Amino acid sequence: MPQIIVENLTKTFKVSQRQAGTLGAIRGLVKRTYNTVEALNNVSFSLEEGELVGYIGPNGAGKSTTIKTISGILVPDSGRVEVMGFVPWKERSEYVRHIGVVFGQRTQLWWDLPVIESFDLLKDIYRVSQSAYQKTRDELIDRLQIAPYLDMPVRQLSLGLRMRCDLAATLLHSPRLLFLDEPTIGLDAVSKLAVREFIRDLNRKNGVTVILTTHDMDDIEALCSRVIVIGKGRLLRDGTLNDLRETVNRERRLRIDLEDSEAQIDIPSVAIWKREGSQVTLQFDPKVISPAELIQRVAAQVAIRDLFVENPPIEEIIARLYEEHLS
Amino acid sequence: MKPYMTVFGAQFRVLLQYRARAWAGFGTQLFWGLIRMAIFTAFYESSTHVQPLSLPDVITYLWLVQALFALTYWSASPEVADKIRNGSIAYELIRPIDLYWYWFARAIACRLAPATLRSIPLFIAAGLFFGLKPPATFASSLLFLGGVASGVAIIAALVCLLNIALLYTLASEGVMRLSIPLTLLFSGMMIPLPLFPLWFQPVVYFLPFRHILDTPIRLYTGNISPTESVWVFLHALIWCVCLTLWGRRLLKRAVSQLVAQGG
């Protein structure tokens, strides 16, 4: 049985509209107009235990609303959600013992207290036994390499460190299911890699199910085998990263470094995607012409210094998907 | 119970860090105490009526108000207000604890920590130099502590209500403008409650605000006798239960229609 079942999840928000300016503000006092925003519209998916799923979509697509509904914070208008046998918003206090949530843009640590005191506080809030707590805490401190910073007040930590501490804080009660809402937002390259590696380990070694929302496609590429794409509250795609590539944009690219920057390449059914000096990028569909054949043909026409085949970056695929569905 | 005690302890420790604020508070309270002492002395000396409280009693009353001043509240819990405004409230909702008691425990710590820091030096200074009398009897000093405890419970329940109002309106200024003058006037902070006109006293003694300052102070001075105190405590308890039940109901409703701010 799947660990998470989401069926026809729908949630609308009423947003009061106000005209700009003083006059608009005065008018708003007398008469308010409301706009209904469909944050989620019939979203359905299910997840097996131990999956690591990327949940992506543009700003305002409904990612956070989904996370907040599945974690029991928001009550949906209609639809069914069942996680580990719980209906999140109905049995919240029992349910939340089994999950962990990180909201990347906010911290759960006490701003003015040393990190370790926030940990101790969470131990009591989740009623974790002392022995289990010590074991989990020490392991997390070790894996996230935060030992030197435990006595610092949270307000003095850099964003990257704070995120590592936040991750540790979320896992102190050993949740089986982890929601990460933009965990790498604003982090530098080193911290991003550290966070990513930690998430991957957590999923592979400890078998924790992870749902990850992010705008950083490198996160998705590095971590997730499965992606769920939503836009304007609707589910657009649900499948592996490769499926997504296949259906949206099968094309691959061949980047060639030419000996002679003036040389011309002309192969039917293959387009020149970009040309900068001696660097030429060709776009081709591997079902029409295989990479080996293409390389052969190119080599017959021009002298090649170097070449390699690549997939279009995932950003482009996603951007195309959004354009197709949202325009 | 343990999670709430821990939350209380953590919040208490945070607030004990602010030593400079405590000294500044002490200075301000001392200054205003002296001014109010002068005002009431002038009133009493220019009046020929017999007042319900003698001048030395009023002066003790005033100093106790100053000493307990830090207990009273002026707004919703600032941390909670911030969390509601920026959406971090989401984190409080994924904890396996009761949000109401969590806020309640924090509110108590927020009131007790600064009060502990400020009132002790003020007690000493006012007792030594400015006419604060010691408690009437040993029993009344114990009753005073009981009165402070029930006052803090009522304050915490009121602060929780302000927090909850924030969930509904985001800006609790309106609710605060309403509740703060009520507290100011009907807790005994501005004028000792026994000095209110007789026809108005039933109203003042019916409201919960009296337990914030007036009750503990008059238990201290012996103005409320130990036998009377039973009824006063019962009155405080009933209010406390009502405010708590009301708060819990409002909170439950607010959470079920919550909109977390900021994405």
Image: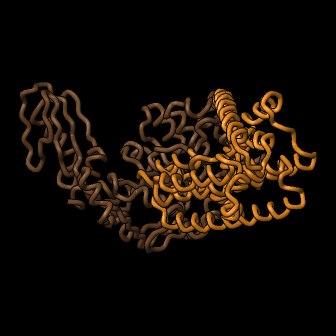
Between A81 and B53, the one nearer to me in the picture: B53
Task: Give the x, y percent position of residue B71.
Answer: 69, 44
> Is B125 on the left or on the right of A99, as rendered?
right
* Quadrant showing the C terminus of chain A: bottom left
Q: Residue at x 67, y 42 (%)?
A: A119
Q: Residue at x 80, y 45 (%)?
A: B54
Residue A72 placement: quadrant:
bottom right
> Is A163 on the left or on the right of A19, as rendered?
right
Q: Residue at x 19, y 40 (%)?
A: A295
A261 lies above or below A251: above
Q: How many marks?
A: 0
Chain letter for brown? A
Between B183 and A240, the one nearer to me in the picture: B183
Chain letter for orange? B
Task: Give the x, y percent position of residue A18.
Answer: 28, 57
> Is A210 on the left or on the right of A146, as rendered?
left
State the residue lying farthest toward the front: B48
Residue B229 placement: quadrant:
bottom right
A70 lies above or below B132: below
Residue A208 visible, this angle:
no
Q: Residue at x 40, y 70 (%)?
A: A10
Residue B120 visible, this angle:
yes
